[in-house]
Amino acid sequence: MHNAYIPFAEPKNEPVLNYAPGSPERKALKATLLELKAAPRDIPMYIGGQEVRSTEQTEIRPPHETQHLLGHFHKSNESHVHAAIDAALKARKAWAEMPWEHRAAIFLKAADLLAGKYRYQMNAATMLGQSKNAYQAEIDSACELIDFLRFNVHFLSGIYAQQPLSPAGVHNHMEYRPLEGFVLAVTPFNFSAIGGNLPTSVALCGNVVVWKPANTQVYSASVFMEILMEAGLPAGVINLIYPSGPVVGDICFQHPDFAGVHFTGSTGVFQQMWKSIGDNIARYKSYPRIVGETGGKDFVFVHPTAHVDAVVAGLARGAFEYQGQKCSAASRAYLPSNLADEIKAKLIAEIKTMKVGRVDDFENFINAVIDEKSFKNIASYLDAVKQSGGKAKILVGGTCDSSQGWFVAPTIIETTDPAYVTMCEEIFGPVLSLYVYDAEKWEQTLDVVDQTSPYALTGAVFAQDRSAIEIMAKKLVHAAGNFYINDKPTGAVVAQQPFGGARASGTNDKAGSVLNLYRWLSARTVKETLVPPTDYRYPFHSPESGN
Ligand code: NAD
Protein backbone atom coordinates (compact mmCIF):
# COMPACT_ATOMS: atom_id res chain seq x y z
CA MET A 1 0.00 0.00 0.00
CA HIS A 2 1.59 3.27 -1.06
CA ASN A 3 1.08 6.56 0.75
CA ALA A 4 1.59 8.99 -2.13
CA TYR A 5 -0.76 11.93 -2.61
CA ILE A 6 -1.70 11.70 -6.28
CA PRO A 7 -2.98 14.90 -7.89
CA PHE A 8 -4.52 14.97 -11.38
CA ALA A 9 -3.44 17.89 -13.55
CA GLU A 10 -5.91 20.23 -15.23
CA PRO A 11 -7.04 18.72 -18.54
CA LYS A 12 -7.86 20.63 -21.75
CA ASN A 13 -11.39 20.83 -23.16
CA GLU A 14 -11.98 18.14 -25.76
CA PRO A 15 -11.59 19.64 -29.27
CA VAL A 16 -14.87 19.81 -31.22
CA LEU A 17 -14.82 18.01 -34.59
CA ASN A 18 -16.61 19.95 -37.32
CA TYR A 19 -18.04 17.23 -39.62
CA ALA A 20 -17.51 19.39 -42.73
CA PRO A 21 -18.01 17.73 -46.14
CA GLY A 22 -15.06 15.48 -46.96
CA SER A 23 -13.87 15.17 -43.34
CA PRO A 24 -13.07 11.70 -41.99
CA GLU A 25 -15.35 12.25 -39.01
CA ARG A 26 -18.32 12.93 -41.28
CA LYS A 27 -17.71 9.71 -43.16
CA ALA A 28 -17.36 7.69 -39.94
CA LEU A 29 -20.46 9.21 -38.36
CA LYS A 30 -22.61 8.62 -41.45
CA ALA A 31 -21.50 4.99 -41.56
CA THR A 32 -22.33 4.54 -37.86
CA LEU A 33 -25.80 6.06 -38.34
CA LEU A 34 -26.52 3.45 -41.01
CA GLU A 35 -25.17 0.63 -38.83
CA LEU A 36 -27.31 1.61 -35.86
CA LYS A 37 -30.41 2.01 -37.99
CA ALA A 38 -29.89 -1.42 -39.53
CA ALA A 39 -29.58 -3.29 -36.23
CA PRO A 40 -32.38 -2.70 -33.69
CA ARG A 41 -31.00 -2.74 -30.14
CA ASP A 42 -32.36 -4.86 -27.31
CA ILE A 43 -31.54 -2.69 -24.29
CA PRO A 44 -31.40 -4.34 -20.87
CA MET A 45 -31.21 -2.72 -17.45
CA TYR A 46 -27.82 -2.95 -15.70
CA ILE A 47 -28.20 -3.98 -12.08
CA GLY A 48 -25.26 -5.18 -10.01
CA GLY A 49 -23.16 -5.49 -13.18
CA GLN A 50 -25.70 -7.86 -14.77
CA GLU A 51 -27.89 -7.30 -17.80
CA VAL A 52 -31.48 -7.61 -16.60
CA ARG A 53 -34.50 -8.05 -18.87
CA SER A 54 -38.20 -7.79 -18.04
CA THR A 55 -41.42 -8.93 -19.64
CA GLU A 56 -42.47 -5.40 -20.57
CA GLN A 57 -40.66 -3.59 -23.37
CA THR A 58 -40.87 -0.05 -24.70
CA GLU A 59 -40.14 0.76 -28.35
CA ILE A 60 -37.60 3.39 -29.30
CA ARG A 61 -38.13 5.37 -32.52
CA PRO A 62 -36.29 8.43 -33.87
CA PRO A 63 -38.38 11.54 -33.17
CA HIS A 64 -37.72 12.64 -36.79
CA GLU A 65 -38.64 9.30 -38.36
CA THR A 66 -41.37 7.72 -36.29
CA GLN A 67 -41.94 4.88 -38.76
CA HIS A 68 -38.48 3.45 -38.04
CA LEU A 69 -37.80 1.14 -35.09
CA LEU A 70 -34.41 1.65 -33.40
CA GLY A 71 -34.98 -1.03 -30.80
CA HIS A 72 -36.61 -1.35 -27.41
CA PHE A 73 -35.70 -1.21 -23.76
CA HIS A 74 -36.81 -3.42 -20.91
CA LYS A 75 -39.07 -1.45 -18.62
CA SER A 76 -38.40 -1.63 -14.88
CA ASN A 77 -41.00 -2.28 -12.21
CA GLU A 78 -40.86 -1.95 -8.41
CA SER A 79 -38.79 -5.10 -7.98
CA HIS A 80 -36.06 -3.72 -10.27
CA VAL A 81 -35.87 -0.49 -8.26
CA HIS A 82 -35.42 -2.50 -5.06
CA ALA A 83 -32.81 -4.70 -6.75
CA ALA A 84 -30.88 -1.64 -7.96
CA ILE A 85 -30.83 -0.15 -4.46
CA ASP A 86 -29.71 -3.47 -2.95
CA ALA A 87 -26.95 -3.86 -5.56
CA ALA A 88 -25.74 -0.32 -4.91
CA LEU A 89 -25.63 -0.81 -1.14
CA LYS A 90 -23.78 -4.10 -1.59
CA ALA A 91 -21.09 -2.40 -3.70
CA ARG A 92 -20.77 0.57 -1.36
CA LYS A 93 -18.05 -0.45 1.08
CA ALA A 94 -15.51 -1.74 -1.43
CA TRP A 95 -16.10 1.23 -3.73
CA ALA A 96 -15.75 3.80 -0.95
CA GLU A 97 -12.52 2.14 0.16
CA MET A 98 -10.97 1.83 -3.32
CA PRO A 99 -7.86 4.05 -3.49
CA TRP A 100 -8.62 7.33 -5.20
CA GLU A 101 -6.25 6.89 -8.12
CA HIS A 102 -7.98 3.64 -9.11
CA ARG A 103 -11.44 5.20 -8.92
CA ALA A 104 -10.21 8.16 -10.96
CA ALA A 105 -8.59 5.94 -13.58
CA ILE A 106 -11.92 4.27 -14.37
CA PHE A 107 -13.53 7.58 -15.33
CA LEU A 108 -10.45 8.81 -17.20
CA LYS A 109 -10.46 5.58 -19.17
CA ALA A 110 -14.18 6.06 -19.92
CA ALA A 111 -13.35 9.56 -21.23
CA ASP A 112 -10.66 8.16 -23.51
CA LEU A 113 -12.93 5.40 -24.79
CA LEU A 114 -15.61 7.98 -25.53
CA ALA A 115 -13.14 10.31 -27.23
CA GLY A 116 -11.86 7.47 -29.42
CA LYS A 117 -13.44 4.12 -30.07
CA TYR A 118 -17.01 5.03 -29.04
CA ARG A 119 -17.26 8.65 -30.23
CA TYR A 120 -19.33 7.98 -33.34
CA GLN A 121 -21.52 5.36 -31.71
CA MET A 122 -22.40 7.72 -28.86
CA ASN A 123 -23.00 10.65 -31.22
CA ALA A 124 -25.04 8.56 -33.66
CA ALA A 125 -27.14 7.18 -30.79
CA THR A 126 -27.81 10.73 -29.57
CA MET A 127 -28.67 11.90 -33.09
CA LEU A 128 -31.10 9.04 -33.70
CA GLY A 129 -32.64 8.74 -30.25
CA GLN A 130 -32.89 12.43 -29.38
CA SER A 131 -32.99 14.02 -32.87
CA LYS A 132 -29.82 16.09 -32.64
CA ASN A 133 -27.87 17.17 -35.69
CA ALA A 134 -24.21 16.10 -35.99
CA TYR A 135 -22.78 19.24 -34.43
CA GLN A 136 -25.26 19.34 -31.53
CA ALA A 137 -24.48 15.69 -30.78
CA GLU A 138 -20.72 16.28 -30.99
CA ILE A 139 -20.76 19.15 -28.46
CA ASP A 140 -23.02 17.18 -26.12
CA SER A 141 -22.51 13.43 -26.14
CA ALA A 142 -18.84 13.55 -27.06
CA CYS A 143 -17.12 16.77 -25.94
CA GLU A 144 -19.17 17.85 -22.94
CA LEU A 145 -19.35 14.38 -21.45
CA ILE A 146 -15.62 13.80 -21.97
CA ASP A 147 -14.96 17.15 -20.29
CA PHE A 148 -17.18 16.29 -17.32
CA LEU A 149 -15.33 13.02 -16.80
CA ARG A 150 -11.84 14.51 -17.04
CA PHE A 151 -12.40 17.80 -15.21
CA ASN A 152 -14.29 16.21 -12.33
CA VAL A 153 -11.24 14.03 -11.61
CA HIS A 154 -9.07 17.15 -11.56
CA PHE A 155 -11.54 19.09 -9.37
CA LEU A 156 -11.88 16.27 -6.86
CA SER A 157 -8.14 15.85 -6.52
CA GLY A 158 -8.08 19.57 -5.63
CA ILE A 159 -10.71 19.07 -2.92
CA TYR A 160 -8.83 16.15 -1.39
CA ALA A 161 -5.74 18.35 -1.18
CA GLN A 162 -7.54 20.97 0.94
CA GLN A 163 -6.54 20.43 4.55
CA PRO A 164 -7.00 22.48 7.74
CA LEU A 165 -4.30 24.21 9.79
CA SER A 166 -2.32 22.28 12.36
CA PRO A 167 -0.74 24.49 15.07
CA ALA A 168 2.12 23.23 17.26
CA GLY A 169 1.21 20.18 19.29
CA VAL A 170 -1.89 19.30 17.23
CA HIS A 171 -2.40 17.51 13.98
CA ASN A 172 -5.65 18.09 12.03
CA HIS A 173 -6.87 16.63 8.82
CA MET A 174 -10.04 16.29 6.76
CA GLU A 175 -11.35 13.12 5.23
CA TYR A 176 -13.82 13.57 2.38
CA ARG A 177 -16.14 10.64 2.93
CA PRO A 178 -18.80 9.59 0.44
CA LEU A 179 -22.39 9.86 1.69
CA GLU A 180 -23.75 7.13 3.91
CA GLY A 181 -26.25 5.42 1.61
CA PHE A 182 -27.11 5.50 -2.09
CA VAL A 183 -27.75 8.44 -4.41
CA LEU A 184 -30.54 8.59 -6.99
CA ALA A 185 -29.62 10.23 -10.33
CA VAL A 186 -32.64 11.25 -12.40
CA THR A 187 -31.68 12.67 -15.77
CA PRO A 188 -33.46 14.53 -18.62
CA PHE A 189 -33.78 13.75 -22.32
CA ASN A 190 -32.07 16.76 -23.80
CA PHE A 191 -28.36 16.22 -23.03
CA SER A 192 -26.59 12.87 -23.13
CA ALA A 193 -23.78 14.65 -21.27
CA ILE A 194 -26.06 15.44 -18.33
CA GLY A 195 -27.31 11.85 -18.42
CA GLY A 196 -23.71 10.68 -18.06
CA ASN A 197 -22.52 13.34 -15.64
CA LEU A 198 -25.17 13.10 -12.94
CA PRO A 199 -24.40 9.49 -11.97
CA THR A 200 -20.63 9.62 -12.62
CA SER A 201 -19.85 12.84 -10.72
CA VAL A 202 -21.52 11.27 -7.68
CA ALA A 203 -19.82 7.89 -8.14
CA LEU A 204 -16.41 9.49 -8.61
CA CYS A 205 -16.70 10.82 -5.04
CA GLY A 206 -17.02 7.23 -3.80
CA ASN A 207 -20.82 7.00 -3.77
CA VAL A 208 -23.06 4.31 -5.24
CA VAL A 209 -25.87 5.26 -7.57
CA VAL A 210 -29.26 4.27 -8.93
CA TRP A 211 -29.55 5.98 -12.35
CA LYS A 212 -32.91 6.59 -13.98
CA PRO A 213 -32.68 8.40 -17.35
CA ALA A 214 -35.63 9.84 -19.28
CA ASN A 215 -37.26 7.16 -21.46
CA THR A 216 -36.39 9.29 -24.49
CA GLN A 217 -32.66 9.15 -23.68
CA VAL A 218 -32.34 5.44 -22.86
CA TYR A 219 -30.90 4.65 -26.30
CA SER A 220 -27.73 6.75 -25.80
CA ALA A 221 -27.63 6.19 -22.01
CA SER A 222 -27.19 2.47 -22.62
CA VAL A 223 -24.19 3.11 -24.90
CA PHE A 224 -22.57 5.16 -22.15
CA MET A 225 -23.25 2.42 -19.60
CA GLU A 226 -21.42 -0.05 -21.85
CA ILE A 227 -18.46 2.35 -21.97
CA LEU A 228 -18.39 2.60 -18.17
CA MET A 229 -18.38 -1.17 -17.84
CA GLU A 230 -15.57 -1.53 -20.38
CA ALA A 231 -13.66 1.12 -18.41
CA GLY A 232 -13.80 -1.16 -15.37
CA LEU A 233 -16.61 0.27 -13.25
CA PRO A 234 -17.23 -2.35 -10.56
CA ALA A 235 -20.60 -4.12 -10.44
CA GLY A 236 -23.30 -2.22 -8.55
CA VAL A 237 -21.58 1.18 -8.40
CA ILE A 238 -23.98 2.62 -11.01
CA ASN A 239 -27.21 0.75 -11.67
CA LEU A 240 -29.15 1.81 -14.76
CA ILE A 241 -32.92 1.21 -14.63
CA TYR A 242 -36.01 2.40 -16.54
CA PRO A 243 -39.00 2.65 -14.18
CA SER A 244 -41.59 5.42 -14.38
CA GLY A 245 -40.67 8.55 -12.42
CA PRO A 246 -43.27 8.14 -9.67
CA VAL A 247 -42.28 4.47 -9.11
CA VAL A 248 -38.59 5.25 -8.63
CA GLY A 249 -39.43 8.25 -6.46
CA ASP A 250 -41.85 6.39 -4.20
CA ILE A 251 -39.38 3.60 -3.44
CA CYS A 252 -36.16 5.60 -3.19
CA PHE A 253 -37.60 8.44 -1.12
CA GLN A 254 -38.95 6.04 1.48
CA HIS A 255 -35.68 4.13 1.88
CA PRO A 256 -33.68 4.78 5.08
CA ASP A 257 -30.41 4.65 3.11
CA PHE A 258 -31.49 7.32 0.63
CA ALA A 259 -28.61 9.81 0.79
CA GLY A 260 -29.33 12.26 -2.01
CA VAL A 261 -30.81 13.00 -5.40
CA HIS A 262 -28.95 14.44 -8.38
CA PHE A 263 -31.66 15.70 -10.69
CA THR A 264 -31.95 17.64 -13.90
CA GLY A 265 -35.35 18.14 -15.47
CA SER A 266 -38.45 20.25 -15.12
CA THR A 267 -39.23 22.47 -12.15
CA GLY A 268 -42.56 20.78 -11.34
CA VAL A 269 -40.99 17.32 -11.02
CA PHE A 270 -38.17 18.64 -8.82
CA GLN A 271 -40.58 20.44 -6.50
CA GLN A 272 -42.63 17.26 -6.18
CA MET A 273 -39.46 15.32 -5.30
CA TRP A 274 -38.44 17.85 -2.68
CA LYS A 275 -41.91 17.64 -1.09
CA SER A 276 -41.82 13.87 -0.83
CA ILE A 277 -38.27 13.91 0.57
CA GLY A 278 -39.54 16.40 3.16
CA ASP A 279 -42.49 14.16 4.00
CA ASN A 280 -40.08 11.26 4.63
CA ILE A 281 -37.35 13.21 6.40
CA ALA A 282 -37.58 11.32 9.68
CA ARG A 283 -36.88 8.00 7.97
CA TYR A 284 -33.36 8.75 6.75
CA LYS A 285 -30.02 8.03 8.42
CA SER A 286 -28.66 11.38 7.19
CA TYR A 287 -30.19 14.55 5.76
CA PRO A 288 -30.23 13.85 2.03
CA ARG A 289 -28.45 16.12 -0.43
CA ILE A 290 -30.99 17.59 -2.85
CA VAL A 291 -29.40 18.92 -6.02
CA GLY A 292 -31.60 19.88 -8.94
CA GLU A 293 -31.10 21.95 -12.06
CA THR A 294 -34.48 22.69 -13.58
CA GLY A 295 -36.38 24.84 -16.07
CA GLY A 296 -35.68 28.24 -17.56
CA LYS A 297 -37.29 31.12 -19.41
CA ASP A 298 -34.10 32.60 -20.68
CA PHE A 299 -33.96 36.20 -21.84
CA VAL A 300 -32.07 38.27 -24.36
CA PHE A 301 -32.17 41.97 -23.58
CA VAL A 302 -31.08 44.20 -26.44
CA HIS A 303 -29.87 47.67 -25.50
CA PRO A 304 -30.40 50.58 -27.92
CA THR A 305 -26.63 50.60 -28.67
CA ALA A 306 -26.43 46.88 -29.56
CA HIS A 307 -24.73 45.58 -32.68
CA VAL A 308 -27.66 44.36 -34.81
CA ASP A 309 -25.92 41.49 -36.61
CA ALA A 310 -24.52 40.11 -33.34
CA VAL A 311 -28.06 40.14 -31.89
CA VAL A 312 -29.49 38.38 -34.94
CA ALA A 313 -26.84 35.62 -34.86
CA GLY A 314 -27.22 35.26 -31.07
CA LEU A 315 -31.00 34.87 -31.33
CA ALA A 316 -30.87 32.53 -34.33
CA ARG A 317 -28.49 30.15 -32.58
CA GLY A 318 -29.61 30.75 -29.00
CA ALA A 319 -33.31 30.17 -29.67
CA PHE A 320 -33.31 27.51 -32.36
CA GLU A 321 -30.33 25.18 -32.03
CA TYR A 322 -31.54 21.74 -30.94
CA GLN A 323 -35.09 23.00 -31.63
CA GLY A 324 -34.96 25.25 -28.56
CA GLN A 325 -34.85 22.19 -26.30
CA LYS A 326 -32.04 23.50 -24.16
CA CYS A 327 -32.79 24.67 -20.65
CA SER A 328 -30.64 27.68 -21.61
CA ALA A 329 -32.40 28.46 -24.92
CA ALA A 330 -33.29 32.09 -25.61
CA SER A 331 -37.06 32.13 -25.41
CA ARG A 332 -37.97 35.77 -24.71
CA ALA A 333 -36.27 38.78 -26.26
CA TYR A 334 -36.67 42.46 -25.55
CA LEU A 335 -35.94 44.68 -28.54
CA PRO A 336 -35.49 48.48 -28.36
CA SER A 337 -37.80 50.50 -30.60
CA ASN A 338 -34.86 52.09 -32.46
CA LEU A 339 -33.49 48.71 -33.65
CA ALA A 340 -36.54 46.43 -33.58
CA ASP A 341 -37.56 46.65 -37.25
CA GLU A 342 -34.06 45.93 -38.52
CA ILE A 343 -33.52 43.02 -36.08
CA LYS A 344 -36.90 41.46 -36.90
CA ALA A 345 -36.39 41.73 -40.68
CA LYS A 346 -32.92 40.19 -40.53
CA LEU A 347 -33.89 37.46 -38.08
CA ILE A 348 -36.94 36.42 -40.10
CA ALA A 349 -34.78 36.26 -43.23
CA GLU A 350 -32.26 34.02 -41.41
CA ILE A 351 -34.95 31.73 -40.06
CA LYS A 352 -36.37 31.24 -43.53
CA THR A 353 -32.98 29.77 -44.55
CA MET A 354 -33.03 27.14 -41.76
CA LYS A 355 -33.65 23.70 -43.21
CA VAL A 356 -35.91 21.41 -41.21
CA GLY A 357 -35.74 17.60 -41.39
CA ARG A 358 -34.01 14.37 -40.45
CA VAL A 359 -30.62 14.18 -38.75
CA ASP A 360 -28.95 12.04 -41.40
CA ASP A 361 -29.26 14.91 -43.91
CA PHE A 362 -26.49 17.12 -42.52
CA GLU A 363 -27.88 20.26 -44.21
CA ASN A 364 -30.76 20.36 -41.75
CA PHE A 365 -30.36 22.90 -38.97
CA ILE A 366 -33.65 22.00 -37.26
CA ASN A 367 -34.68 18.44 -36.47
CA ALA A 368 -37.71 17.06 -34.62
CA VAL A 369 -38.85 17.82 -31.09
CA ILE A 370 -38.50 14.93 -28.70
CA ASP A 371 -41.93 13.27 -28.64
CA GLU A 372 -45.64 13.55 -29.23
CA LYS A 373 -46.34 15.02 -25.81
CA SER A 374 -43.88 17.84 -26.38
CA PHE A 375 -45.13 18.34 -29.96
CA LYS A 376 -48.71 18.75 -28.75
CA ASN A 377 -47.67 21.05 -25.93
CA ILE A 378 -45.80 23.37 -28.29
CA ALA A 379 -48.69 23.28 -30.79
CA SER A 380 -51.10 24.35 -28.04
CA TYR A 381 -49.08 27.56 -27.45
CA LEU A 382 -49.09 28.29 -31.19
CA ASP A 383 -52.85 27.74 -31.37
CA ALA A 384 -53.33 30.08 -28.42
CA VAL A 385 -51.41 32.83 -30.25
CA LYS A 386 -53.73 32.48 -33.22
CA GLN A 387 -56.66 33.00 -30.84
CA SER A 388 -55.09 35.73 -28.72
CA GLY A 389 -57.25 38.51 -30.17
CA GLY A 390 -54.29 40.55 -31.37
CA LYS A 391 -52.26 40.39 -28.13
CA ALA A 392 -49.70 38.27 -29.96
CA LYS A 393 -49.00 37.33 -33.57
CA ILE A 394 -46.75 34.89 -35.39
CA LEU A 395 -44.08 36.62 -37.49
CA VAL A 396 -42.61 33.47 -39.01
CA GLY A 397 -43.17 29.71 -38.65
CA GLY A 398 -46.10 28.63 -36.51
CA THR A 399 -46.69 25.34 -38.32
CA CYS A 400 -46.37 21.76 -37.07
CA ASP A 401 -46.14 18.56 -39.09
CA SER A 402 -46.29 15.05 -37.63
CA SER A 403 -46.49 13.09 -40.89
CA GLN A 404 -42.86 11.80 -40.67
CA GLY A 405 -41.86 12.87 -37.15
CA TRP A 406 -42.47 15.55 -34.54
CA PHE A 407 -41.56 18.64 -36.56
CA VAL A 408 -42.28 22.21 -35.45
CA ALA A 409 -41.17 25.04 -37.74
CA PRO A 410 -38.88 27.62 -36.11
CA THR A 411 -41.29 30.26 -34.90
CA ILE A 412 -41.21 33.88 -33.77
CA ILE A 413 -44.09 35.35 -31.83
CA GLU A 414 -44.38 39.09 -31.27
CA THR A 415 -46.49 40.37 -28.41
CA THR A 416 -47.46 43.81 -27.15
CA ASP A 417 -47.91 42.42 -23.63
CA PRO A 418 -44.64 41.73 -21.77
CA ALA A 419 -46.57 39.35 -19.48
CA TYR A 420 -48.13 37.38 -22.36
CA VAL A 421 -48.02 33.64 -21.60
CA THR A 422 -45.22 32.85 -24.08
CA MET A 423 -43.02 35.50 -22.42
CA CYS A 424 -43.43 33.75 -19.05
CA GLU A 425 -43.75 29.96 -19.45
CA GLU A 426 -41.09 27.47 -20.56
CA ILE A 427 -42.26 26.04 -23.92
CA PHE A 428 -39.20 23.87 -24.70
CA GLY A 429 -39.44 24.08 -28.46
CA PRO A 430 -38.23 26.24 -31.38
CA VAL A 431 -40.33 29.23 -30.33
CA LEU A 432 -38.98 32.70 -29.55
CA SER A 433 -41.21 35.49 -28.21
CA LEU A 434 -40.37 39.15 -28.85
CA TYR A 435 -41.46 42.28 -27.06
CA VAL A 436 -40.55 45.71 -28.41
CA TYR A 437 -39.94 48.35 -25.73
CA ASP A 438 -39.54 52.11 -25.88
CA ALA A 439 -35.79 52.66 -26.35
CA GLU A 440 -35.94 55.68 -24.01
CA LYS A 441 -37.14 53.38 -21.20
CA TRP A 442 -34.48 50.70 -21.38
CA GLU A 443 -33.58 50.96 -17.71
CA GLN A 444 -37.19 50.56 -16.50
CA THR A 445 -37.61 47.61 -18.88
CA LEU A 446 -34.87 45.74 -17.00
CA ASP A 447 -37.31 45.48 -14.07
CA VAL A 448 -39.78 43.75 -16.39
CA VAL A 449 -37.05 41.30 -17.51
CA ASP A 450 -36.17 40.57 -13.90
CA GLN A 451 -39.71 40.02 -12.68
CA THR A 452 -41.53 38.39 -15.59
CA SER A 453 -40.77 34.74 -14.87
CA PRO A 454 -40.07 32.66 -11.76
CA TYR A 455 -36.93 31.25 -13.40
CA ALA A 456 -33.34 32.52 -13.30
CA LEU A 457 -31.25 30.18 -15.42
CA THR A 458 -29.56 32.02 -18.29
CA GLY A 459 -29.81 35.47 -19.80
CA ALA A 460 -27.94 37.63 -22.28
CA VAL A 461 -27.55 41.34 -22.83
CA PHE A 462 -26.33 42.97 -26.02
CA ALA A 463 -24.90 46.52 -25.93
CA GLN A 464 -21.90 48.51 -27.05
CA ASP A 465 -22.19 51.16 -24.33
CA ARG A 466 -19.99 49.98 -21.43
CA SER A 467 -21.82 51.94 -18.73
CA ALA A 468 -25.10 50.37 -19.89
CA ILE A 469 -23.51 46.93 -19.60
CA GLU A 470 -22.50 47.74 -16.04
CA ILE A 471 -26.06 48.85 -15.15
CA MET A 472 -27.61 45.77 -16.79
CA ALA A 473 -25.24 43.38 -15.00
CA LYS A 474 -26.16 44.98 -11.66
CA LYS A 475 -29.93 45.21 -12.15
CA LEU A 476 -30.16 41.65 -13.43
CA VAL A 477 -27.87 40.21 -10.75
CA HIS A 478 -30.41 37.60 -9.61
CA ALA A 479 -32.14 37.08 -12.96
CA ALA A 480 -29.71 34.45 -14.28
CA GLY A 481 -27.15 32.00 -12.91
CA ASN A 482 -25.34 32.17 -16.24
CA PHE A 483 -25.18 35.72 -17.59
CA TYR A 484 -23.84 36.49 -21.05
CA ILE A 485 -22.63 39.80 -22.46
CA ASN A 486 -22.81 40.15 -26.24
CA ASP A 487 -23.26 36.41 -26.68
CA LYS A 488 -26.09 33.89 -26.93
CA PRO A 489 -27.30 32.45 -23.60
CA THR A 490 -26.57 28.82 -24.58
CA GLY A 491 -23.43 26.72 -25.06
CA ALA A 492 -21.82 26.65 -21.59
CA VAL A 493 -18.53 24.74 -21.66
CA VAL A 494 -17.33 22.60 -18.74
CA ALA A 495 -14.75 24.41 -16.60
CA GLN A 496 -15.27 27.63 -18.57
CA GLN A 497 -18.86 28.57 -17.70
CA PRO A 498 -19.95 26.43 -14.72
CA PHE A 499 -23.66 25.93 -15.26
CA GLY A 500 -26.76 26.40 -13.14
CA GLY A 501 -29.49 28.84 -12.24
CA ALA A 502 -31.21 30.15 -9.15
CA ARG A 503 -34.82 30.97 -8.19
CA ALA A 504 -37.14 28.31 -9.70
CA SER A 505 -34.33 27.13 -12.00
CA GLY A 506 -32.55 25.01 -9.43
CA THR A 507 -30.20 24.77 -6.51
CA ASN A 508 -27.37 26.32 -8.57
CA ASP A 509 -24.79 23.70 -7.68
CA LYS A 510 -22.95 24.33 -10.95
CA ALA A 511 -22.39 21.11 -12.83
CA GLY A 512 -18.94 21.08 -14.38
CA SER A 513 -17.30 22.81 -11.45
CA VAL A 514 -15.79 22.01 -8.10
CA LEU A 515 -18.94 23.34 -6.36
CA ASN A 516 -21.04 20.39 -7.52
CA LEU A 517 -18.66 17.79 -6.14
CA TYR A 518 -18.80 19.19 -2.60
CA ARG A 519 -22.45 18.11 -2.48
CA TRP A 520 -21.50 14.44 -2.78
CA LEU A 521 -18.97 14.45 0.04
CA SER A 522 -19.41 14.47 3.78
CA ALA A 523 -16.24 15.69 5.45
CA ARG A 524 -14.91 14.17 8.65
CA THR A 525 -12.54 16.38 10.63
CA VAL A 526 -9.91 14.54 12.63
CA LYS A 527 -7.93 16.28 15.40
CA GLU A 528 -5.06 14.55 17.13
CA THR A 529 -3.37 16.10 20.13
CA LEU A 530 0.21 14.91 20.18
CA VAL A 531 0.92 15.30 23.91
CA PRO A 532 -2.48 15.55 25.63
CA PRO A 533 -2.93 17.59 28.86
CA THR A 534 -3.06 15.57 32.05
CA ASP A 535 -4.74 18.10 34.34
CA TYR A 536 -8.20 19.54 33.73
CA ARG A 537 -7.33 22.91 35.41
CA TYR A 538 -6.32 25.96 33.37
CA PRO A 539 -3.61 28.35 34.65
CA PHE A 540 -6.20 30.96 35.60
CA HIS A 541 -7.57 28.61 38.25
CA SER A 542 -4.38 28.86 40.30
CA PRO A 543 -4.61 30.99 43.48
CA GLU A 544 -3.14 34.52 43.09
CA SER A 545 -0.01 35.00 45.24
CA GLY A 546 -0.63 37.40 48.11
CA ASN A 547 -4.38 36.64 48.45
P1 NAD B 1 -38.76 15.98 -16.99
O1 NAD B 1 -38.89 16.73 -15.73
O2 NAD B 1 -40.00 15.61 -17.72
O3 NAD B 1 -37.98 14.61 -16.75
C1 NAD B 1 -36.71 14.59 -16.12
C2 NAD B 1 -36.51 13.25 -15.47
O4 NAD B 1 -37.44 13.14 -14.37
C3 NAD B 1 -36.82 12.06 -16.38
O5 NAD B 1 -35.92 11.02 -16.12
C4 NAD B 1 -38.23 11.69 -15.99
O6 NAD B 1 -38.56 10.36 -16.29
C5 NAD B 1 -38.17 11.92 -14.49
N1 NAD B 1 -39.47 12.09 -13.84
C6 NAD B 1 -40.61 12.58 -14.38
N2 NAD B 1 -41.59 12.59 -13.44
C7 NAD B 1 -41.04 12.11 -12.29
C8 NAD B 1 -41.53 11.89 -10.97
N3 NAD B 1 -42.79 12.16 -10.64
N4 NAD B 1 -40.67 11.39 -10.05
C9 NAD B 1 -39.38 11.11 -10.37
N5 NAD B 1 -38.87 11.30 -11.61
C10 NAD B 1 -39.68 11.81 -12.55
O7 NAD B 1 -37.77 16.81 -17.94
P2 NAD B 1 -37.32 16.51 -19.43
O8 NAD B 1 -38.49 16.77 -20.34
O9 NAD B 1 -36.60 15.23 -19.55
O10 NAD B 1 -36.23 17.65 -19.64
C11 NAD B 1 -36.58 18.96 -19.92
C12 NAD B 1 -36.58 19.83 -18.68
O11 NAD B 1 -35.30 19.75 -18.07
C13 NAD B 1 -36.80 21.29 -19.00
O12 NAD B 1 -37.61 21.86 -18.01
C14 NAD B 1 -35.40 21.87 -18.94
O13 NAD B 1 -35.35 23.25 -18.67
C15 NAD B 1 -34.79 21.07 -17.85
N6 NAD B 1 -33.33 21.04 -17.95
C16 NAD B 1 -32.63 21.82 -17.07
C17 NAD B 1 -31.25 21.87 -17.15
C18 NAD B 1 -30.45 22.71 -16.21
O14 NAD B 1 -29.24 22.53 -16.12
N7 NAD B 1 -31.07 23.63 -15.49
C19 NAD B 1 -30.58 21.11 -18.11
C20 NAD B 1 -31.33 20.30 -18.96
C21 NAD B 1 -32.72 20.28 -18.87
Image: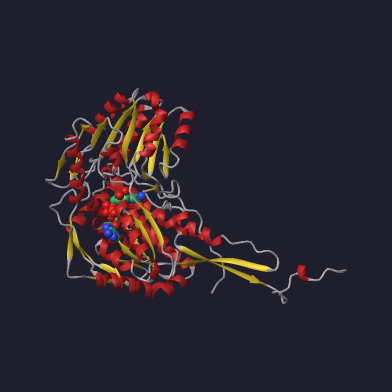
**Furthest residue toward right:** 546
Image quadrant occupied by the N terminus: bottom right
Name which residue lies at 25% across and 59% down: 218
**Furthest residue toward front:** 547
Name which residue lies at 33% across and 48% down: 295
Q: Quadrant of ligand 1?
A: bottom left
Image quadrant occupied by the C terminus: bottom right
Residue 189, above or below 167: above
Residue 303's quadrant in the figure?
A: top left
Name which residue lies at 32% across and 31% down: 312
Q: How many marks?
A: 0
* Left-right relation of 473 to 311: right
Which color scheme does this rendered protein use? secondary structure
* Left-right relation of 483 to 368: right
Camera-side residue: 539 or 211? 539
Camera-side residue: 341 or 538? 538
Residue 338, above or below 94: above
The image shows residue 146 at horizontal and vertical percentages of 39, 55
Camera-side residue: 310 or 2? 310
Camera-side residue: 7 or 160? 160
Residue 238's quadrant in the figure?
A: bottom left
The image shows residue 353 at horizontal and vertical percentages of 23, 33
Residue 352's quadrant in the figure?
A: top left
Task: Kindly tell me whether residue 112 is visible in this rendering.
Answer: no
Residue 229, above or below 455: below
Task: Kindly tell me whether residue 348 is visible in this rendering.
Answer: yes
The image shows residue 333 at horizontal and vertical percentages of 32, 34
The image shows residue 118 at horizontal and vertical percentages of 32, 58
